[in-house]
Each structure stands twice: as C-alpha cells, then as structure tokens.
Amino acid sequence: MSQDRTWILLGRKISGEATLDELRELEMLLKEDAQLSYQASLIKELELSTPDNTGDTENALEKHMLRMQELYPEDFQVPVAIFPETPENRSWIRKNGIPALVATVLLIVVVLGGIWSLRDRKQGGKELVSEISTRHGSRTMVTLPDGSVVFLNVSSKLTYDYGKEDSRQVVLEGEAFFDVHKDEQRPFIIHTRKMDITVLGTTFNVRAYEEDKTVETSLIQGKVEVTIKGEVPKKVILSPNQKIILFNEAQQQPKVISVPVTENPDKEPYRLEEVTVNPNDSLVAETAWKENCLVFNDERFADIALKMERWYDVRIIFEDKEVEDYRFTGTFINETVAQTLEALRFTSPFRYNIDKKKIIIKR
C-alpha cells in the first residue's frame, strides 16, 4: 500500500501538482524504503534531462530509456519494445508530450522495480556531484544526504557535493529555504555569485536570482555568517529575523527602501534589515513562497513582473514605462495569473491582454 502511495505522490510531483504536504509525505516514504528512493532518483534524472522542445516526442522515451541504461547498465533494464510503432501510439505521444513520456517511464519503473539492485552511486570511491533544478512555475523539496531539508523555489538550481569529509558544500542559483541538520564538525556552506553563507545548523532563506536587482539572505532561526565576495571579502553575522540585502553591481539601489536595522558607515553595497512579518497572520514575506504564497511588499511593478514570470511560467511585456513604476503590496495564495492581475488593478488601474503565456500590460 505504501509503495502504491509513493508512486502516486511521485507522479504528482513530476506533473507539478503536488502540494508541499504531499512533497513532505513523499520524502518520508522514500526515507523508509531505500530501493524506492533510488528508483525515484533515476526517474528524477530522466525528468530533468528531458528537453522542453518536444518536436521529436516519438523517439524521446526510447532515447532516454537507453540513456539511463548506459548510465546504470546493471540497474536499468530496457524492454525490447517500449512503444510498438503504431499510429495510435504516435498520436497519443504527440497529444500528451514529454510529461506523458515521463509518466509512462514511471509506470515502467514500477513494473521493472523487482529486477533492480540497490547500489551506491559513486565513481572511484567518491560521491557524484548531484544537481536539482526547477523550471518556471514549479517548486520542489529535497532531503540532502546529511539530513538537511531544502525547499527549492521556481526557476532555481542547487548543486551539491558531499565528497569532502570536513564540510558540506552546495551552490545555489535562484531561491531556496534551508533547514540545515546540525553538525558542528562539518559546516554547511552555500555558494552564490555574490556571497557565501556558512552555518552549523539553522533555518534561513537565500534568494540569488541573477536577473534580480538584489540578493538576499534571511535568517529565521540560529545564526549564519555571510561572506560578501569582492577584492576584500567582508564577513557579516546575521541574527534571527534579520536579513542582508546585496545590490547587484549592474543595478542601482532602489529609491524607496524600508528602514534598515543598521546603517552601513562604509557605504558597502549591502544593507541589514528586519524580515517582513504580516501582523495579521504572522506570515514571513521572505519565506512565504514555501507555503505557496506570492508576496509583494511595496515593490515596483517591473520587479513584481519578474517574480510573476517565474511563478506562473509566463512572459510579461510592458508597453508603458510609467506602469513599470507602479508600486504594489499584497499576498496571493493559489491565485491564477489573471486573478493576481485583476487584484492589482484595484489600486493602480492598468490594462492587460493574455495570449497563452504572453502578457501585454499597458495604461
């Protein structure tokens, strides 16, 4: 029964329909069954290696099944005929595309599960570097080998290498919430383009999208040391409910910024502030995305558009520069992109047109 539930949840995760509660449940089930966990990891590799372009979908399934057999010849068996060459099958694949192929592989894995053997994925005695990524509109949760839990936001990538015995190193592009397992002998280090974050055991959020104007680390619990990269690296210690904001070199500091916790006498390109807490529901804005909440706090429409593009997997184009400077504050839970735009129009009227994944905004 638990195995059936595991595959159902894994299917929902792959299709992007799983809730955070279901993702947590899936992680717990995979922890209880090492073989299922291994099989699920291979399916995840197949999903992430599948291109967005589905122009050759008829051959995509067989191609990737053969690729998995090449990578793990003793663990992955490919049936003689994955899809019989029939008009019905070709039509079904064209209609349903790559997600259907991944789901079909999921079913094949269930059938073939009994012939798989569990083995450590190592080369030359060293752990392989692992990579987890999300696309526009999708989020995921993963438990790292040391027990640390990471929630990965939309359009993000986490690479981790636990080959070194004295430290735990990860590289982040995008945004993630970390609940780090305490290990005083092995510090947990997160590398981003602008800063490194060193912790022993704590919960915090890191936002480091390359296209954003700012990079942030928000501490919820514990203590972290942030090393700001530069010709002369600078270390900053954060306390709970505090965040550090770095301004990208190519971007100018916004004209309107919330009141800082501390002024920066050295005029460094960073600020320290308190995290933003909603007094009505105690929701922390910096980590609200983890609860499927999209939050804006007195932000320019142009900056909000970047968030919405990642969140809803759309492209937003402004036809009026004045509209880009409109400012909005709001919290949106499970709303569609159209519902969010309609809500924003109540405070600062504008017009918009939605054409599939393209949105035009004007006065």
Image: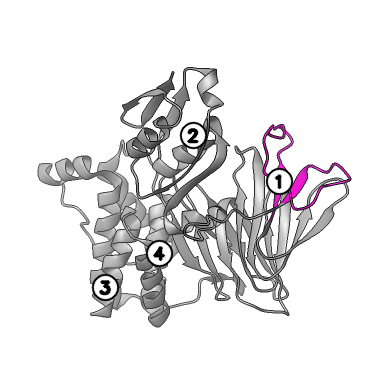
- The residue to which callout 2 is attached is 305
Crowd class of label 1 (few under 14; some 14 to 19; many from 20; radius 10 Å): few
Distance between the Cα atoms at labels 2 and 4?
35 Å
Comes first in the chain, label 3 or label 2: 3
Q: Quadrant of the N terminus?
A: bottom left
* Image coords of residue 263 (percent x, y): 81, 48
Query: Answer yes or no: do the residues labelled 2 and 4 have beta carbons within 8 Å?
Result: no
Q: Residue at x 54, y 53 (%)?
A: 285
* Image coords of residue 319 (percent x, y): 47, 17
Comes first in the chain, label 4 or label 3: 3
Crowd class of label 2 (few under 14; some 14 to 19; many from 20; radius 10 Å): some
Helix, strand, or loop for circle 3? Answer: helix
- In front: mark 4 or mark 3? 3
- In front: mark 2 or mark 1? 1
Helix, strand, or loop for circle 1? Answer: loop
Comes first in the chain, label 2 or label 4: 4
Q: Residue at x 34, y 67 (%)?
A: 22
Distance between the Cα atoms at labels 4 and 1?
48 Å
Between residues 115 and 292, which one lies in front from this camera angle? 292
- The residue to which callout 1 is attached is 259
- In front: mark 3 or mark 1? 1
Residue 142 appears in the rendering: yes
Residue 117 appears in the rendering: no
- The residue to which callout 4 is attached is 42
- The magenta span reads 243-272
Helix, strand, or loop for circle 2? Answer: helix
User: In the rendered structure, which amino acid carries the disc numbered 1?
Assistant: Val
Query: Answer yes or no: do the residues labelled 3 and 1 have beta carbons within 8 Å?
Result: no
